[in-house]
Amino acid sequence: MNSVWRFLLFLYNLLLIILSGLLIAAAIGRPEPLKYIEIALSTTQNRIIMGVTGVLLLTLGIYVFISTIKLQPRVKSVEIDHSLAGEVSITIPAIKLIIMKAVKNVEGIKEIKPTVNSRPDGLEVYLHMMINPDIGVPELSKNVQDAVRKYLEDIGGLKVAEVKVLVDDLSPGFKTSTS
């Protein structure tokens, strides 16, 4: 988002805060907000200015609302190389398969669910893992991050911006029965 839109959103939010304060003051019985409204609407010129301001704020509000609910198109593939000879891309499922192969070599992981997002500065990889409770989380996480980054860069030819790890369930891996 460029600086002009940030400034407009700042002004819009500032006006919403002021309006909220006036509504709260009117709700608790303060007479000032009603006097301000009477003064603002006392002349035809002021009414026109208030109407135009209202239309502008409504337009900005609708634009912000639509832009926040608009879904970003999902990236189905990531471009590896683009040259005069052509373009080379790799699909997200193929990237996930490379991640699964990289993690297979790391001891102590019971289950992993990768999520991959493409950014301008490289891939953003999220790993949701279940691990063995006997292994240290910091060391295992570092090993997984290094293995995934190396595999994606060496095998896939991809640039990796960051690898985030979320360790979830530390269950021991076997069921206990009560009898």
Image: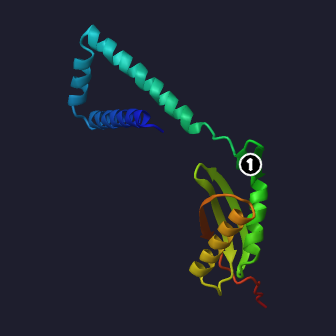
Give whichever of 95, 140 is nearer the camera: 95
Which quarter of the rendered picture does the C terminus lie within? bottom right
Give the labeled residue for mark 1. Answer: 77
**Residue at position x 68%, y 63% from top?**
153
Residue at x 70%, y 84% (from the top left corner): 172
Place of residue 53 in the rendered image (x, y in percent of width and height, measured from the top left) = 36, 20
Left or right of 15: which side holds 74?
Answer: right
Q: Position of residue 107 (x, y in %)?
A: 72, 82
Q: How many marks?
A: 1
Farthest-out residue, front:
84
Farthest bottom residue in view: 179
Q: Secondary structure at mark 1?
A: strand
User: In the image, is residue 128 above or below residue 139?
Assistant: above
| Residue 90, x across and y down, in percent | 76, 52
Q: Amino acid at mark 1?
A: Ser
Residue 106: image x %, image y %?
71, 78
Q: Is residue 154 above or below residue 29?
A: below
The answer to which image quadrant residue 86 occupies is top right
In the image, is 94 to the left or to the right of 117? right
Q: Quadrant of residue 123?
A: bottom right
